[in-house]
């Protein structure tokens, strides 16, 4: 039977929403205070959902220790207490949480195989959240 | 079509252990969860049903009825119990969060279907705020 297992992780990071394709005025208008030149930060809550059959021997969809190790290597070590705009992921993409969601999904999708990543959902604040399920 | 979710909580103890394996393998796979003295959680259960809004009542289901079904079928059986030792479906099945979501679905599907009107859509079990499993009735 197919079940879905979700584990949440937290990172703290800074960013600034800014597009080189826009003028200074257009950046200020589009991104508002998120365009503040010195950046700002969030505690991001990242939910990673894996789907698949429940292994009859373990009762598990995925062993959480394996999931933790992959997320630590691919996501936490890379982004926690970092400036997202300086990461290669955001060299040509605005560091919105939509793009962070897609970027993390793509990183984990490969690293978790053969387990099936179903969804990445990120809460930027208690009131803003984003999710991506691939394509 | 509307999705409607009701939440309930219960507290229970459990451990993870596969009797077909050696002690070493159980400890290697399940870590601290394999401690045979057990440990416990405050579980949060979310049950989602789906259906059309009744034009007379404005309900998909009567939430009081759903609450009573969840209490009778799940909370009364699981709350303040040792899942491995006191709940029949876990006598030979490891009470992981995944297996709990499946077992709770099996407990609720019959009563929800028999009532007519709404279908069970999703069972989600939170073991902690940061860990949850869900089952959607898929094979």
Image (spheres, coloured by chain):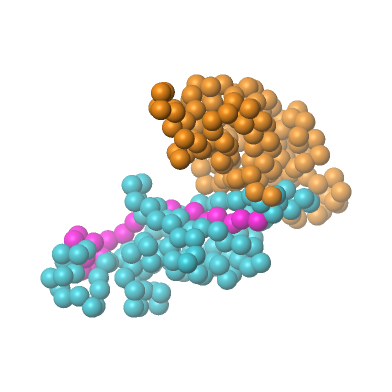
Chain colours: A cyan, B orange
Q: Is residue A51 magenta?
A: yes
Q: At 51% across and 70% down in the image, what residue appears?
A: A107
Q: Nearer the viewer, residue A84 or A115?
A: A115
- Residue A77 in picture, x, y percent from top left: 49, 66
* Viewport quadrant of the N terminus of chain B: top left
Q: Nearer the viewer, residue A12 or A33?
A: A33
**Relative to residue A34, is residue B33 depicted above or below?**
above
- The magenta region covers A32-52
Q: Is residue B61 left or right of residue B18?
A: left
**Relative to residue B138, is residue B12 depicted above or below?**
above
Q: Is residue A135 left or right of residue A109?
A: left
Q: Nearer the viewer, residue A87 or A77?
A: A87
Q: Quadrant of residue B86?
A: top right
- Residue A4 in picture, x, y percent from top left: 60, 51
- Residue B74 in picture, x, y percent from top left: 64, 28
Q: At 81% across and 47% down in the image, what residue appears?
A: B18
- Residue B14 in picture, x, y percent from top left: 70, 36
Q: Is residue A92 magenta?
A: no
**Relative to residue A133, is residue B9 depicted above or below?**
above
The secondary structure making up most of the magenta span is strand
- Outermost residue toward the front? B55
**Residue A9 can be seen, yes or no:** no
Q: At 52% across and 47% down in the image, what residue appears?
A: B130
Q: At 57% across and 71% down in the image, what residue appears?
A: A110
Q: Quadrant of residue B53?
A: top left
Q: Nearer the viewer, residue A126 or A30?
A: A30
């Amino acid at each position: 039977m197919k079940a879905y297992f979700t584990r949440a992780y937290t990172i703290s990071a800074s960013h600034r929403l800014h597009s080189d394709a826009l003028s200074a005025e257009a950046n200020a208008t589009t991104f508002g205070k998120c365009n503040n030149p010195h950046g700002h930060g969030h505690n991001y809550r990242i939910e990673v959902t894996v789907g698949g059959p429940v292994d009859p021997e373990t009762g598990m969809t995925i062993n959480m220790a394996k999931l933790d190790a992959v997320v630590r290597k691919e996501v936490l070590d890379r982004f926690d207490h970092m400036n997202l705009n300086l990461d290669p992921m955001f060299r040509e993409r605005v560091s919105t949480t939509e793009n962070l969601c897609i970027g993390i999904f793509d990183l984990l999708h490969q690293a978790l195989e053969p387990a099936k990543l179903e969804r990445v959902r990120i809460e930027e604040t208690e009131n803003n959240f984003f999710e991506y399920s691939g394509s | 079509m509307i999705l409607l979710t009701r939440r309930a909580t219960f507290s229970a103890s459990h451990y993870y252990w596969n009797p077909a394996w050696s002690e070493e393998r159980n400890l290697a796979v399940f870590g601290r969860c394999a401690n045979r003295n057990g440990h416990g959680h405050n579980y949060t259960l979310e049950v989602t049903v789906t259906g059309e809004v009744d034009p007379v009542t404005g309900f998909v289901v009567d939430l009081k009825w759903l609450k009573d079904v969840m209490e009778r079928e799940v909370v009364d059986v699981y709350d303040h119990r040792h899942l491995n030792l006191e709940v029949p479906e876990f006598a030979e099945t490891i009470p992981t969060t995944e297996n709990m979501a499946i077992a709770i679905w099996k407990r609720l599907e019959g009563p929800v279907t028999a009532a007519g009107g709404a279908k069970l859509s999703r069972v989600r079990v939170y073991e902690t705020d940061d860990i949850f499993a869900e089952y959607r009735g898929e094979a």
